[in-house]
Image (cartoon, grey):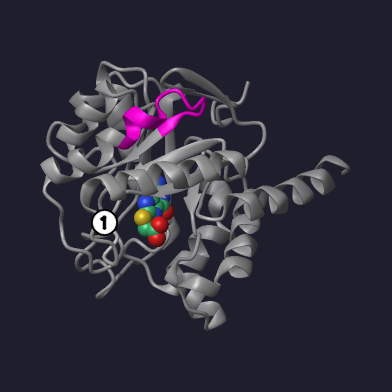
Amino acid sequence: MNLFEPARRLRCGRFVLDLDRPLVMGVVNVTPDSFSDGGRYATHEAAVRHAHRLIEEGADLLDIGGESTRPGAAELPADEEIRRIVPVLDALRDCGLPLSVDTRRAETMRVALEHGADLVNDIGALRAPGAIDAVRGSDCAVCLMHMQGEPGTMQQQPKYGDVVGEVEDFLAGRVAAAVENGIARERIVVDPGIGFGKTLRHNLQLLAALDELAALAPVLVGVSRKSMIGNLTGRDVDHRLAGSLSAMLAAAMRGARILRVHDVAESRDALRVWQAIDDAQ
Ligand code: 7PJ
């Protein structure tokens, strides 16, 4: 047996996910609509409605996030993050899909797990105080993502000697820390963190070398609508679908097993066609 063969299954809270084929993780943002004065209820309603649409479109998992971590974003207090996420988790608990929560905070992780979250998607790779303890005693999956710096300033001057080697070393270290602290390997996925403290060139180099990261753990990748796609195509955020699909397929071909996307139906179609060709080989 090859010890470095990536896991084919992921323990993920109430679920065990088969990773033989790439899965589609649909993004559900729970952020107040600045054009609506309907308040909190309208915000939750909209998020839950959007989630149901993504389920119909064929999502395999849902990623629920209350904090914007786009470059330049300001930090959100944990209690506000919790107030945004919990009603949405409660409403989706029995939707039949694994629920992921996109958070860096131990307190939010703890509360989310009490409300049925199956995966903790942490752009901070469990580096926050108490984060490892928050997930240790549960059976949730964890996504360990690489980020250089902090969302507020990370795009100011990203610098690496060897971006692929450094991201790989960081993720290997975080996997080791998680395993040493009692988080089973079968619960861990890694993510190069496209756009998180990276120039266009860094992002491209990481995507091109994704198969190297796949030796550590199953790989999750998010490229959907990111500025990388805008930089390459000259399109604004509402016109990045074709570019996003192309990057997603390039990632899938290099072994990515969970694709974090906004456009679930289109991503499903693209993966289905690629998969059929791959199967015919
Ligand atoms: C990612 C994420 C990503 C993981 C965001 C955006 C920014 N979580 N959360 N990987 N991106 N694991 O969607 O543009 O790439 S928020």
Image position, residue 31 (x, y; %): 28, 54
Residue furthest bottom in the image: 234
Q: Which residue is mark 1?
A: 32
- Residue occupying the point 29% across, 18% down: 182
Image position, residue 80 (x, y; %): 14, 45
**Residue 258 visible in the displayed image:** no
Amino acid at circle 1: Pro
Rendered position, 150 above or below 201: above
Image position, residue 202 (x, y; %): 43, 68
Rendered position, 195 above or below 13: below
- Judged left or right of residue 67, residue 276 is right
- Judged left or right of residue 39, residue 279 is right
Rendered position, 41 above or below 229: above
Quadrant assignment, res 246: bottom right
The answer to whether residue 158 is magenta is no
- Residue occupying the point 27% across, 42% down: 103
- Residue occupying the point 31% across, 63% down: 70
Helix, strand or loop at label 1? It is: loop
Nearer the observer, 246 or 166: 246
Residue furthest right in the image: 280
Span of residues in magenta: 88-99
**Residue 20 visible in the displayed image:** yes
Indicate the quadrant containing the C terminus: top left, top right, bottom left or bottom right.
Answer: top right
Image position, residue 9 (x, y; %): 56, 24
